[in-house]
Amino acid sequence: MSLLVCFSFLGLLIFLKNTIQNPFILWLGFGAVITFNYFLTKIYLYWDIYFQYWPIRFLFPCLVLLIASLYFKCHNKALYFLSVILFSVGILWNLDSGIVVYISWVTLLCYDQLFQNDRRLIVKRILWHLLMNLIILLLVVAIFSLFIHLRSGNYPDWQTLFKYQKTFYISGFGMMSMPLFHIWNIIILMYIVGLFISIRAVLEKENTYQDRMIFLLSILGVGIFSYYQGRSHDVVLTIVAYPAILLWAIFADRLLLNWKAGRLLYPGKIYLLVIMSIFIVALSVLLFSGKSLLIIKQARRGFDSFTTRYPITALKENIDFIRSNTVFGEKAFIICEPHFDGIYYGNTGLRNPANIPGSTELLLANDFEKEILFLSKHNEFKLFVDFAFAPQELIRVINENYTIIGKSQSGMHYLRWNERTLR
């Protein structure tokens, strides 16, 4: 996960390097993205490992910016088909960000054709892009379905792909109301300005690479903004604001080039850029000056974890206890502190025999009912329970059907199906 996060930010850096000429603006823009998108959120979340955004929802938006910055420099056919396959896979990787990236990429390819003079050629090439992307997407879905069938004997239940979108966006679970007047107004304004520049470029036939990147960031930013629209918390806004920050860097670079060339500038552009510049620079300085020691401390802790042997903790003790009573790769059901089951499975090599989400995503009542039903009827697996974190309904089912075989000093119990129940 750390490597994927680093690769994502590296992709953004390459994108900026290919798009911005001024090195100071390049590094200021990149530093602002890291500051607002990553460090500011991490500090608020007490350095929580927020995998659901970094890298899960962050990887493919960075990939589309990286690939776009490479493709529109050379228009390589191999890179084109690789990108279409990759962004089709992105929908399966994560629907929220994947569909935004896919639509942004296809829209960018169509936008690129609008600079042609022949209208029939424009329509022909746009239709070709739409058809080719659709065919490859269907092929990726078909190959994935076949792969899952060969692995499990069942085809994917594609309705569940939209399960959480229905839960959060239609049912409104976990949503927060969106304020009318807020700093998000400035972010949306950046996307509107970007789209205006993109449309003007087509009308004036300003066929430049930078206009394409402005269009991509504007479309991508609007799509990514839905993550904040669904849960309008200030921290979520810092997570999704990076396309607007990248746009600011491009606008600043373009403004500087126009100033050096002696071109007349519109006052509105200058005012917008000055406001954004003061905001970004001031907040960056404030954050790094107040939290620099904390950032260094956390970074050192992360690097030290590769080489330092930490004292035995309850978590480590429980992992060793589970390992001593299982064989790598076998099925075992683990009930523990919320969000820790993934750590136990990952460090023991065990497989979850139940067809339910982990504790982090156990949100729906019917998933919890499946867990109770599973514990009531299945008996061929080993069960590990930390009763301090087990719901009362599960404790009742466990006491009725299972016998304790062993216990770790930290409270992890090893149980097997009660033989009396079997008879």
Image: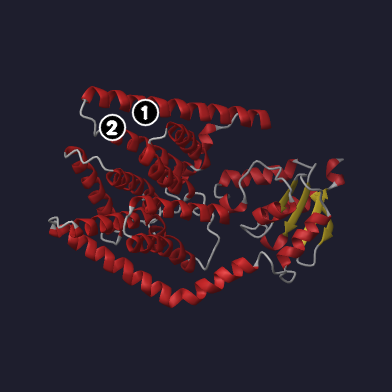
Q: In the rendered view, would you say 395 is above or below 43?
A: above
* Mark 1 residue element: helix
Looking at the image, residue 212 sits to the left or right of residue 262; the answer is right
Residue in view at x 66 percent, y 46 percent: 371
Q: In the rendered view, would you say 92 is above or below 1?
A: above
Which mark is on residue 154? none
Q: Which residue is mark 1?
A: 129
Looking at the image, residue 323 sits to the left or right of residue 298; the answer is right
Residue in view at x 61 percent, y 46 percent: 357
Q: Quadrant of the C terminus?
A: top right
**Residue 221 x/y as whole percent:** 34, 49
Is label 2 or label 1 in front?
2
Q: In the rendered view, would you say 117 is above or below 192?
A: above
Which kind of residue does numbered mark 1 sit on? His
* Mark 2 residue element: helix
Which kind of residue does numbered mark 2 sit on? Gln
Looking at the image, residue 41 sits to the left or right of residue 276; the answer is right
